[in-house]
Image (cartoon, rainbow, N blue to C red):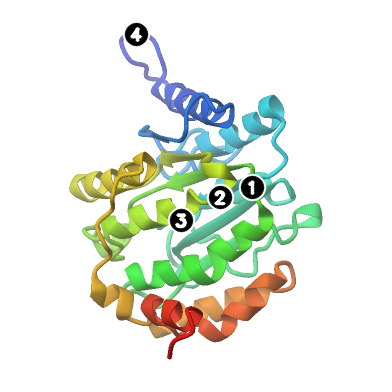
Amino acid sequence: MRGTHKSGVCPTGLAVGCVVDLSLKVAARELKNGFAVVRPPGHHAESHQPMGFCYFNSVAIAAKQLREKMKLEKILIVDWDVHHGNSTQQIFYDDPSVLYISIHRHDSGNFFPGTGSIEECGQNKGQGYNVNIAFGGLLTPPMGDAEYLAAFRTIIMPIAREFRPEAVLVSSGFDAAMGHPAPLGGYQVSPACYGHMTRELMSLADGKIVLALEGGYELTAISDAAEMCVKALSGDELPSVQEGELQRPSCAPALETFEEVLKTQAKYWPVVQKYLGTIQYSLMEAQKKRNGGG
């Protein structure tokens, strides 16, 4: 990207600097947490070429800075952009100090960028530190709150708690939010669900969490979802996810994905084995059974 603002500052460099500076301040406890509202996004930018509107991988650079400057040994990156973060996976594929968990539309590699299949688990010392929740189903039906909450309950949070990160970075794309047409996402995740996913992640790393804006194309959807994330970070009361989604079991394509992910990751994270028999539960049913009812 050759253009600059009138000030002479390249917007791509400014985006990276904002994410890095915010991450360092949160890690140092100068700030409690934060949300970097930046453009352009970064999680597709590979070492040798820009890709998918991305020029530099801001979140990955921030993670490396946290390791080098703050001497952190365990960093969790959660990527809930509807597209897989091919660059983030590539950068940390053999690195056990960074756990990368991505939840994305995959459709057997037929959705951009085509990477991020379930069997891509890392290599060498990094094997097991790459987790892809790669949904299929071709939008029949589209994934929504029930599926994302189930993924958090059975895969993301159990593995994250076992990893015990010292900081959490979120590649916070909002193109899985309702309002995006099929070519750009096609999923139906609500703003409230984004808020609750943020609050779940805040229970890790003593609350040291930074969200960085990635994808998203519908301004209203981005704004509504981001507002709920900021409410969560600020400790404000969140609206409840719709009761129908709390009571709805995940759709069949999602259940197939969860089963494959759990069987694949159990060799690296044995803690997830106990969740294999619960993937068919709605969130309310799972909570009821956990509390001894039903």
Q: Quadrant of the C terminus?
A: bottom left
Residue type at mark 2 is Leu
- Distance Cα–Cα, label 4 vs label 2: 39 Å
Q: Is residue 74 left or right of residue 252?
A: right
- Distance Cα–Cα, label 2 vs label 3: 8 Å
- Distance Cα–Cα, label 3 vs label 1: 14 Å
- Label 3 belongs to which residue? 200
Instruction: Indicate the position of residue 44 as horizontal and vertical percent values.
Output: 50, 45
Looking at the image, is mark 3 or mark 1 earlier in the sequence?
1
Residue type at mark 3 is Glu
Mark in front: 4 vs 1: 1
Under tag 3, what secondary structure?
helix
- Label 1 belongs to which residue? 165
- Label 2 belongs to which residue? 204
The answer to which of 102 and 136 lies nearer the viewer is 102
- Distance Cα–Cα, label 3 vs label 4: 39 Å
